[in-house]
Amino acid sequence: MSVTELDDFRQETRAWLSKNCPPGARGPGEVHTGSTKVTITNPDVQLWMERMAERGWTVPMWPEAYGGGGLDIAQTRVLYEEMAALDARPPLLNMGTRMLGPTLLEYGTEDQKRRHLTTIAQGGAAWCQGYSEPGAGSDLASLRARADDHGDHFLINGQKIWTSGAQNADWMFALVRSDPDAPKHQGISFVLLAMDQPGVTVRPIELISGSSPFCETFLDNAVARKEDLVGELNDGWTVGKRLLQHERSGQGGLSPVSARPRPVGVTVDTEPCEAAMQYIGTQNGRIADPEVRSEVVTWQMNSAAYTLTQRRAGQENDSGGTPAEATSIFKMYGATLAQDRQELLIQLMGTQGIGWQGDTFTETELGATRSWLASKAVTIYGGTNEVQANIIAKRVLGLPD
C-alpha cells in the first residue's frame, strides 16, 4: 500500500471511529470478553463491540472469511493509533482473539476456522487454557490428563490448574495425553472442548491479592469431538508450543499490534514517580533523595528502552506474524519490568502502600497493595522466567544443554 493510500485509509478510519465509538467505550473501563456468562453493564461497550465486529475490526488482521478485517500490518497500526488518539478501549479482548485464533489460522481445518474464528470475532465465546496440571507446570510435557478414543469423540479425564478465567469461559483449548505409551513429548494432542457440559467442574482459586482469576478445572469424561482435534493426533505438542509463542508475544508486546501506543492515561515511563510524589520529599519539583531519584530514573530508562525495542521489533516484523523463540526475550524482560514497577511504587508510598483495609487508606492505596501482590505472578504465568531463560539459551543463543 502506497503512502497516499495509507493516508487515505487513516482519514477514513479516523472519521469512522469518531462517529462510531460511543462515549462509554472511551477511557478506562469495561472491555468486552466475548463470554456468554458475563453480563455487560455498560451498553456502550456492547454497542462498540458489535460495530467493530461488523467491520471486522475486533480482529483486524484476520481474513474477512473468518470475521476479520483483512487489514495488513501497516493498516492495523494506523487503526490502533487512531483508536488511541480517541482513547477508545479495545472492542474485544480474550484468549480467543490473542492466542487460539492465531493458532487456528496456522493449524486449524477450514471447518474449525469457520466455526470457531467467526464466533470469536463476533464476541460470541470466551476461551480458557487447559495446559498446566498439579504435576505438570514448568515441565508441561509431563501432563497426565488423558484422552480416550471413542469413535467420533474423545473422553477427557484429568485435572487442569491455573486455568485463567475458566469460570466465565465457554470453551477450553487443552493439551491431553492421547498415547500414554509414547515418549512424553509425543502422544499429546491439542483439543477443543465446551465448558458447559456435565463432565467439567470449575473451582476458582483465591489469590493473596484477594482476586480469583485462576481456577482448577476437573475433567470427568468430558467430551471433545474429533472434529475439534487441532493438528494431527499425537502431535499436539507442536501446536501447543506455537500457541505459547502467540501468548508470550502478546505479553511481551510483540503481537501484530505491538506498535499500538499505551492506553491514554497510563504513562508508564513516568507513572511510578508521578503516582507517588505526594508520599516522598521533593525539592524544586523533583525527588529530594538522590538514591531514590536514581532508582526511579533507572526504571524509567529501562521502561523507555523496552518500549522502543518493542516498537522496533514490531516495525521489523512486516508480515505481522508472531515471532518464534524471540518472544521469550520480551516476555521475560517485560514481566520483570512490570514486577519492578510495583515494587518501586510500594517503596515510594511507604506504609501507605501496604494497606489492606481501613479508613486510613484511600482506594488508590488499597489498589496499589493488591496490584503489588498480584504482580508476583507475572514472572510465573505464561511460562516462568526460568523457562524463558532456558528457551533463550538453547534456541536463541544456541548454547549447549
Image (cartoon, helix red, strand yellow):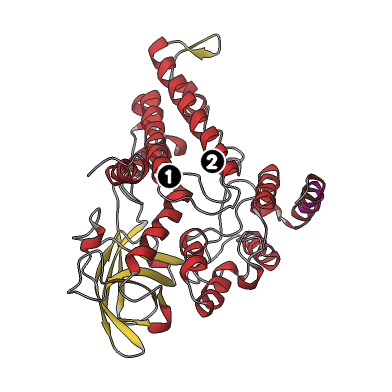
Q: Where does the C terminus fall, quadrant-wise?
A: top left
Q: For the stretch drawn in magenta, what is the main secondary structure?
A: helix
Question: Mark 2 touching mark 1, by CB under 8 A?
Answer: yes
Kindly identify which numbered label has been placed on residue 326.
Answer: 1
Percent x, y of residue 183? 20, 67
Q: Amino acid at mark 1?
A: Ala
Q: Secondary structure at mark 2?
A: helix
Q: Is residue 12 magenta?
A: yes
Write down the region rendered in magenta: 7-13
Q: Secondary structure at mark 1?
A: loop
Q: Amino acid at mark 2?
A: Ala
Percent x, y of residue 196? 39, 78
**What residue is drawn where x is 58% and y is 73%?**
118
In the displayed structure image, the side of residue 252 where residue 179 appears, left or right = left
> Residue 189 versus residue 118: which sits nearer the camera?
189
For disc 2, the marked residue is 313
State the image quarter where residue 64 is shown: bottom right
Q: Is residue 8 magenta?
A: yes
State the image quarter where residue 151 is shown: bottom left
Percent x, y of residue 71? 67, 58
